[in-house]
Amino acid sequence: MVKKFFVFGVFAAIAIATACADNPGNPISPSAGGVLTAGAAPDGSTLKAPAPTLVSPISNQRVDTPELTLVVANSSTSFATDVPLTYRFEIYNSAGTTRLYVADGVPAGSGTTSHVVTLQLDGDQTYQWQARAESDGTVGPWTTRGVFVMETTQGYIRGNELYDPLMNGKTIGTIHGPVTFIPGLGVRLESQLSYISYQLDQTLTEGEFSIITSGMPANTEGGKTKLFAMASGYSDIVVNDRRMTVEKRGDPAGVVAWRFITHGDQVDTEGAERQFVDFREERTYFWQATWRNNFFNLLIKEGGANGNLIYDKGKGFSGRAYDPNPHVIYIGAPVGRSGPEGASVDHVTIRQVWVSSRPRPGFANR
């Protein structure tokens, strides 16, 4: 009987040893750096650390800052405290089906880790995001996804793109002369000496400059007053050799005229081409100047960006591109040698300034 128990014990020991040899990864133990590196878990993670915790933005938070910052509470490894972790952040569309943005290798902060998103997300849109910890080729589990709404109340200048809503009581440009911010409507230029200037980081050789106006009758002051303009630098707008000016004249009342000067050509309205438009103070108007494929065009719609087309006129130009340097943008226009008569349209309210090589986005049409 004793021999039988002995034999059974020997076979059991052999079986256990064989099993361990067949499964060298079990039992699991920390690697040299303190990170568990066993086979992937059902969720695909290979780093033995819990998911970080989303801090902000979450729970449909509305983000109205110029830059979006994602914040997580840090994760930690299960068997060591000195393991260097980095973080990966991802942003998805509202349905969570399309990945729009990825940032990896973000160094861990103290207690929390923050990342400033470099992609300009469209406003008035809902987004999802997630994050995970990573270390030396191993990855932790994803967080549950957070949801946020990107607002459009802030403006920005990035490269050769500019957006300034002007409906939030401020501007990203420089104010000259008296102006009044009207919540939800924009900024009103109080005199012909009032204007706002912006300087793009890069020259926009082809693109569009568009705005929405309200509170502007056909009969305003000034014979050559300008609604919006562009130039090379800050020299006299009247003689600037890379100027684009869009005029809404007060004498004769309601006449629309424009001029566009490139590196090698000039196109403008002349004589009968300067067209009368019966602007009404109680109505809203969309203005869009475009310069693409050697063609400059101005269109105006009554009722906003999706309203009725009431003006559409353009001309082709030859030679080299439009190349102001630096590229300066104006709402209204500064006083030049022709005096206030050729400066800004007064008492007009302007909002939703868009300058870009990209088509105007829907969020800029409110």
Image (cartoon, helix red, strand yellow):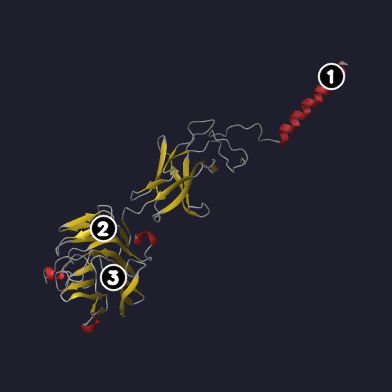
Which mark's residue is nearer the viewer, 3 or 2? 2
Q: Amino acid at mark 3?
A: Asp
Mark earlier in primary sequence (3, 2) = 2
Q: Residue at x 26, y 68 (%)?
A: 324
Q: Which residue bears the numbered disc 1?
A: 5
Q: Quadrant of residue 322?
A: bottom left
The quarter of the rendered structure image containing the N terminus is: top right
Q: Answer above or below: position of 96 versus 288.
A: above
Q: CA distance from mark 1 to mark 2?
A: 93 Å
Tell me, yes or no, if residue 305 can be seen here: yes
Q: Quadrant of residue 190?
A: bottom left
Q: Which residue bears the numbered disc 2?
A: 186
> Judging from the image, what secondary structure is the residue with disc 3 in?
loop
Q: Residue at x 35, y 66 (%)?
A: 305
Mark earlier in primary sequence (1, 2) = 1
Q: Which residue bears the numbered disc 3?
A: 323
Q: Nearer the viewer, residue 291 or 149?
A: 149
Q: Residue at x 80, y 22 (%)?
A: 9
Residue lying furthest bottom: 272
Which mark's residue is nearer the viewer, 3 or 1? 3
> Judging from the image, what secondary structure is the residue with disc 2 in?
strand
Q: Nearer the viewer, residue 56 or 261?
A: 56
The quarter of the rendered structure image containing the C terminus is: bottom left
Q: Answer above or below: position of 97 versus 326.
A: above
Q: CA distance from mark 3 to mark 1?
A: 95 Å
Residue lying furthest top: 2
Q: Position of residue 117 (x, y in %)?
A: 40, 50
Within 10 angstroms of label 3, few (less than 14), some, or many (20 or more) residues?
A: some
Q: Amino acid at mark 2?
A: Gly
Q: Residue at x 56, y 36 (%)?
A: 48
Q: Amino acid at mark 1?
A: Phe
